Amino acid sequence: MEEVKQTTDIVSTEDILLQRIRQVAANYKGKDGSLIQVLHMVQGVYGYLPLEVQEIVSIELGIPLAEVSGVASFYSFFSTQPRGRHTIRICLGTACYVRGGVTIVDILEKNLGVGIGQTTKDGMFTFEVARCIGSCGLAPAISIDTVVYPHVKPDEIPGILQSWYKKDEEEGVF
Amino acid sequence: MGRSKGTKVFALAGDIVNSGIIEIPMGISMREIIYDIGGGMKDGKKFKSVQSGGPSGGCLTADHLDVSVDYESLAAAGAIIGSGGLIAMDENTCMVDTARYFMEFIQDESCGHCVPCRVGTKRMLELLQRMTNGEAEIDDIENLETLARTVSETAMCALGQTAPNPVLTTIKYFRDEYIAHVRDKKCPAHVCTALKEYSIDPEKCKGCGMCARGCPVGAISGEKAQPHVIDADKCIKCGSCKSVCRFDAVILT
Amino acid sequence: MINLTINGKKVSAPEGSTIMEAAKLAGIEIPHLCHCPGIHTNGSCRICVVEIEGMKKLMASCIVKAQEGMVVHTSTERVRLARKIVYDLLISNHPKDCMACARNQSCELQALGGTLGILETHIHGEASPRRVDISPSITRDTRKCILCRRCVTACHEVQGVGAIFAQNRGFNTVIAPALGKPLNSVDCAMCGQCTVVCPTGALTETDGMEKVWAALTDPTKRVAVQVAPAVRAALGEEFGMTPGETVTGKMATALHDLGFDDVFDTNFAADLTILEEGTELLQRLTAALTGGEAVLPMITSCSPGWIKHCEHAFPTEVDHLSSCKSPHTMMGAVIKSFYAEKIGIDPKDMFVVSVMPCTAKKYEIQRPEMQNDGNFNVDAVITTRELARMIRTMGIDFTNLEDGSFDAPLGFSTGAADIFGVTGGVMEAALRTVYELVTGREMPGSNLHLVPIMGLEKIKEAEIKFENVKPEYAFLEGVTAKIAVTSGLKNADVLLTQVRNGTSPYHFIEVMGCPGGCINGGGQPRIRNNVPNYKELRIEALYNEDEGKPIRKSHENPDLLALYRDFLGEPGSHLAHELLHTTYTPRGHFNEWLDPDFQRKQAMEEMLIAE
């Protein structure tokens, strides 16, 4: 833990995170082709890639900001918006689609109150589409973080979501 | 069998009894995969198509069940082995909707560098959407084919070059289904919502009113013990009426 | 040599040729669009596809290299149909109002439709999400973009700036600054190289013509125009004249015919700049060599694209920039003081127009420092391309005009002024004067040229030894001044990095923002596709102008000497400083230097690093 020195300004958690990002990025200065890797790591530290973070990557790697932003916006994995604590991915691969994946999308949208690509207002879930999670035998499937729910039925959805709220409460996340 | 030697791993999935990862010797037939290993179609439904190779692959028909599963034979039929995905589809699958679904995936994945894939697959998707919405014209099938061939011939990378495969194979083997969507504005598999029509058979209807009570938009009207009627303009094709009718009086066309 | 067959003809092409290059040798021009010689070839439009026997798919001829024994067909039914459909796809996502577009009749997409023989379009559908972004110098209309990415290459690879890039993916791809911000809020230098390479109306200079027409027809305004040296070396190209032909005389006549009240020459102000900047250089050298404080190397400041780039990329080094305004803004200041007074007109009623080979000048004139006594030095800038449009709109038959001349007292210029438009020209002009000032002798060299700093090399260096100097410059005796000349922002970065690191060996650096100098400015005619050696031709044209003049040194310009005698006093005088000198604004890559909290944040970050 850093010692908090007596200063006229208090160093915020934000500043500490940004400093970590600077250090991560600076390790890759001059290494061609490392932009995607750096963005991946930086998103891991900060949670998402807002303008301020992209500017740091741009300066530390010596890559124009427009290019950093271009690469970040190209890949669906990178987000410029804050993400929820947990990510729900509905598989819409061929097998899951054929087994009623679209119905599950509708149910999830109704229960979460947000559409695909968005985050719930309470910051709990980000809802995304996955093009295949590799569990075709378990179709239709959804995953929440690393947990896969096989052969998921529409009426199971509310219970599944509730269980995550309960888990977070128990772990004192709120 | 040519150059296809040894075994191959496939992911068998879809409307099939046994789905999972299978390893088969190259050269066995599709029939053996679907029925012997896969256990046949789920819920006793009829086999319609098997999609081989994902969005870059092609849809094969019951006529191809005796095709030897190897690189050359599948390619000759218009499909590919690709990543080894085999999706079995039953009679309740709409092939036009399936082609539209694959084109949506392609559009999501298109990097946007070359014109044929970036704009071409978008225009193909729009054509397919018009078809599944009942807004297409008879020329659109030929337009779709021509566009598909051009995209395949001119795209910069394999994504664009193979994107037209599902479209071209479904048009080739299921042309009647396309014609039904485009000319008759009907979906034979009853999948495309915009083309569904729910109506009540007056001979079977007992006028119990269950359907009217359950209709979320109040599209069904009728006197007690008299045959009820669905207002097509209000109907949102949710199918609730059909699922509650005990007399099989609701017809889906 | 590679031997192949194209359309039945046997062709021999040098090793490494593409099919397109080999076809050209056989007299076949394969239709193409995104391919841009000297910028890039990325094979993304798929128009140039050809059939190669033995290959299943159609291949892009701009990329695929010719191979021994290849049999190529460039125009089979299959190829022609494919090209038409690809073209149809392209324009299904493009506005159809050509008649109201700045590139009407000069658009490469339009021309391609003619080449391909398109008579109908069949494909329709949704348009990509797009926007219009108007900055002071450059207007972006992404609806018209065909995503050829020439602009990205020009900005990143050629200029080394990288203000724009492809954002998002697939059908939603758009060429834009980071996070889709407006161009005027990022570190775009406004150099306009992107507008020169853009094949359509997606990137153009922001319009200056409307303001000029309005002034010309406003009876309360006295409208003065001035023209940069590089314009006369290229304007004729807009009217089909041979590249490399200067059209000074016709240009002056055309400007009179357009209705300008005064037709002046920016060259006059170039001579003026030399006197001011030469004096400044000598002041800095004097201080440096006699124990005073001086910031060296001094760097030229006549290129506003370079200035803005310096403010963004090297905000700590702006003190190296000469305090001189650029020639045309000096001219504007002189017109609205000296000249307005002379003819008895209120400066508020003077409207000054600059015709420039440059887009960055449009940004420059609205900078707050470019004002004196509440009036902006210059009111409007039009590019060479825009002047040609105005001449056409007026119906002037340019190629058949008689030669005219510029007006006194701001129309006379020396040969040193003409070469301001080429890389190395400002330095040469400056040295012709400085050397003579210091030694009393003419600068040694071939015909007053300093050969090592001529030409299109990225960075050019030379040394000038001062010997047998005049008594008042005794401290310069035996001193070897090291100078460097560069053009193009990427090359400027190399020299400025040295400056920032404290390892720059030079005393004086000339930087021009555009590669090759103003003759290749962002506002010049677009002929690079047809005339590969256009830069060399335009450069030669300006050196010819210089060599053809009787007076070739700025300090011998009689009208300029009169201006000092009657008005300014002497170079570097108080009045000269007020009117002709300026200050700069450190910005940083993200304009962070403009934020008042910036210094405070910097201090905090240094503290964190120390922990």
Image (tube, coloured by chain):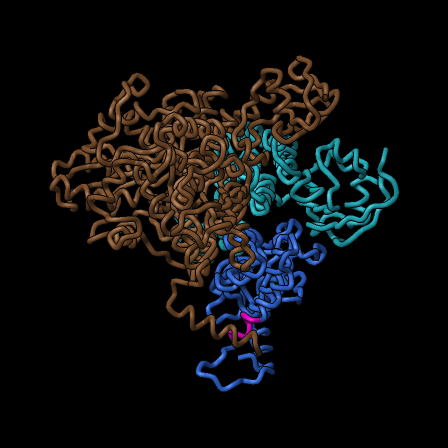
Chain colours: A blue, B cyan, C brown
Which percent across, then down, holds residue A13? 52, 77
Left or right relative to C324: residue C534? right
Image quadrant in which the N terminus of chain C is located: top right
Q: What's the residue at 54%, 54% (across, down)?
A: C504
Q: Nearer the viewer, residue C278 or C238?
A: C278
Q: Nearer the viewer, residue C181 or C403?
A: C403
Left or right relative to C475: residue C156? right
Does residue C214 appear in the picture of this structure? yes
Which percent across, then down, holds residue C229? 36, 34
Q: Quadrant of residue C258?
A: top left
Which percent across, then down, holds residue C204? 39, 38
Confirm whether the magenta stretch covers residue A18. yes
Q: Nearer the viewer, residue C133 or B111?
A: C133
Confirm whether the magenta stretch covers residue C235. no
Q: What's the residue at 26%, 23% (across, down)?
A: C404
Q: Residue furthest bottom?
A: A6
Q: What's the residue at 70%, 56% (across, down)?
A: A134
* Stretch in magenta: A14-19
